[in-house]
Amino acid sequence: MTNSTDKSNSPSTADEPYRGRDMTTGRRWLYAIATPIGVLLIRFFWLTCRIRVVIGEEHAVEGLKDGPMIPVYWHQHQLFLTKYLIGLRRIGIDPGFLISPSVDGEIPARIAAHHRCYVIRGSSSHTGARTLRDYYVALQKGISPAITVDGPTGPAFECKPGAVMLAQLSGRPIVALSFHASRAWIFRKWDRFVLPKPFSTITIAVGPPRYVPKRIDALLTEQLQKEIDVELKSLYRLARDAAG
């Protein structure tokens, strides 16, 4: 199993020009102050909410056989599936995350770096080909880069082709994840972002590794996207039903 713990090759925030707004000295000071606050807030939710059940974790172990995997999940489920993937370091995963190259992505990038995660600064909407390349490079380094398959702007719960293309190019498996919280706030955003309430219980479901053939056409790509849609919805129901 390949496992890289050296983040020296992770693209730095200086490697990608800021999009839309400049990184001023004032913003640098502001973000330096805001980052530890963000870390504390995330840690609060991570510590007060308990992961009670994980269904199918053996699939994650299988997905990491002989190399990294490609974790995929809905954009709304980022918060606790990020926690779960970081926790999977105990079985050899080295997680990576895509974060916007805009100035607004600076705080999330710093928080990810604080947790020793590999950071890809890119956008599937604006720098798609470059982002796919950076994902591929991450896999070659032993990183398991997570993909929010309906991000960054939706439509919600509709898988885009990026994960399928990456699995085709790399030969590494897609592993789908979903979770259910016993109590949660659902934000009125395009992704219906889920923020579990403090002291709620979390149930996570992991799907079996999915390999993509080296030779596929547009029709098969679209079919695989729909299959991932169905699998993620099925995993959510599985987690919800297991939670009782």
Image (tube, rainbow, N blue to C red):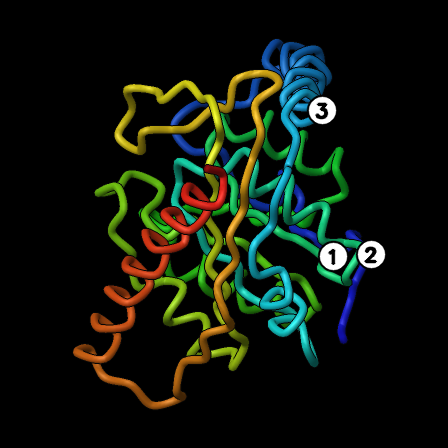
Whichever of labels 3 and 1 marks the residue nearer the N terminus, that label is 1
Horizontal and vertical percent for residue 204?
A: 54, 46
Disc 2 and disc 3 in contact, CB within 8 angstroms: no
Q: Could you say which quadrant of the image residue 56 lies in?
A: bottom right
Tell me: residue 193, above or below residue 155. Answer: above
Horizontal and vertical percent for residue 212?
A: 40, 80
Disc 1 and disc 2 in contact, CB within 8 angstroms: yes
Horizontal and vertical percent for residue 185?
A: 41, 18
Disc 3 and disc 1 in contact, CB within 8 angstroms: no
Tell me: residue 165, above or below residue 96. Answer: below
The disc label shown at residue 162, or none: none
Q: Is residue 100 visible?
A: no
Q: Nearer the viewer, residue 61 or 153?
A: 61
State the SS at label 3: helix
Kindly identify which residue carries mark 3.
47
Q: Could you say which quadrant of the image residue 2 lies in?
A: bottom right
Residue in the picture at 61% in, 45% down: 53
- Three-letter code for the amino acid on which mark 2 is drawn: Asp
Residue in the picture at 26% in, 30% down: 190
Residue 226 located left or right of residue 49:
left
Horizontal and vertical percent for residue 164?
A: 37, 70
Considering every residue shown, the one lying at the far front of the view is: 244
Residue in the picture at 29% in, 38% down: 153
Kindly identify which residue carries mark 2.
6
Tell me: residue 101, above or below residue 122. Answer: above
Residue 219 located left or right of residue 33:
left
Q: Between label 2 and label 3, give the one nearer the viewer.
A: 3
Kindly identify which residue carries mark 1.
9
Task: Name the quadrant of the N terminus.
Answer: bottom right
Considering every residue shown, the one lying at the far bottom of the view is: 215
State the SS at label 1: helix
